[in-house]
């Protein structure tokens, strides 16, 4: 490259950027080579600067003490469902609802779209809460791109203790 070509590229921003790179890289190198061993202590570290992933395996092992006494036994959990069944609505319709039997809770559900319904889809597939909080039924509503409603059949997954 000629001297004239070098001068045309020698701008203030290029010089400042090159100087900044040397200062940044040189500062880390200076700290690594010139600082005395063990000269950085707890006073120089910011709170939270040393985290477990930054510690060596031997440092982690040195922090472990003996195991404490076992805690008290916890309360027994609620009994789980021992009986699960799927209930299906009797017929197809534009809206289909199927209920669990007494003592059962709806844990899931869905529906089937009639194959003769054209471009049909389920617009609604959701649980119905019997007592205001616990779902005991499942509802599906069908819709068709050609007609207003489509034939659907609901099913519900019921569980009981």
Image: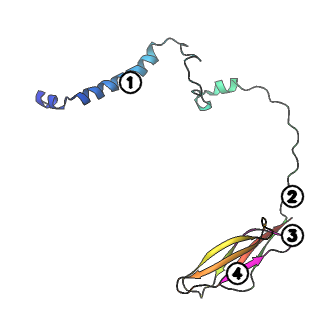
Tell me whether circle 4 and circle 2 mark residues in contact (CB < 8 Å): no
| Quarter of the figure with residue 46 | top right
SS label for mark 1:
helix
**Residue furthest toward the top?**
36
Please identify, in this view, whether the residue under mark 4 or under mark 1 is nearer the observer. 4
Q: Label 4 to label 1, Cα distance in Å?
A: 71 Å
From the viewer's perspective, tell me whether residue 50 is left or right of residue 82: left
SS label for mark 3:
loop
**Residue furthest toward the front?**
132
* Secondary structure mainly formed by the magenta segment: strand
Please identify, in this view, whether the residue under mark 1 or under mark 3 is nearer the observer. 3
Label 4: which residue? 96
The residue depicted at 85 percent of the width and 31 percent of the height is 69
Label 1: which residue? 25
The residue depicted at 36 percent of the width and 22 percent of the height is 23
Q: How is the image coloured?
A: rainbow
86 and 98: which is toward the camera: 98
The region drawn magenta spans: 94-109
* Earlier sequence position, callout 3 versus callout 4: 4
Find residue 161 and report its horizontal and vertical position in percent: 87, 64
Q: Is residue 107 magenta?
A: yes
Label 2: which residue? 79
Mark 4 neighbour density, 10 Å: few (under 14) some (14–19) many (20 or more): many
Mark 2 neighbour density, 10 Å: few (under 14) some (14–19) many (20 or more): few
């Amino acid at each position: 490259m000629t001297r004239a070509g070098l001068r045309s590229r020698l701008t203030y921003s290029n010089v400042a950027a090159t100087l900044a790179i040397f200062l940044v890289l040189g500062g880390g190198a200076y700290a690594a080579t010139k600082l005395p061993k063990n000269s950085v202590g707890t006073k120089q570290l910011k709170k939270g600067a040393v985290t477990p992933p930054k510690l060596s395996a031997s440092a982690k092992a040195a922090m472990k003490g003996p195991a404490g006494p076992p805690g008290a036994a916890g309360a027994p959990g609620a009994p789980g469902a021992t009986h699960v069944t799927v209930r299906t609505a009797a017929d197809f319709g534009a809206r289909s609802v199927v209920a669990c039997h007494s003592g059962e809770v709806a844990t899931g559900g869905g529906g089937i779209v009639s194959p003769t319904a054209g471009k049909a889809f389920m617009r609604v597939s959701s649980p119905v809460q019997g007592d205001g909080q616990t779902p005991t039924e499942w509802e599906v509503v069908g819709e068709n791109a050609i007609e207003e409603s489509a034939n659907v059949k609901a099913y519900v997954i019921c569980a009981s203790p």
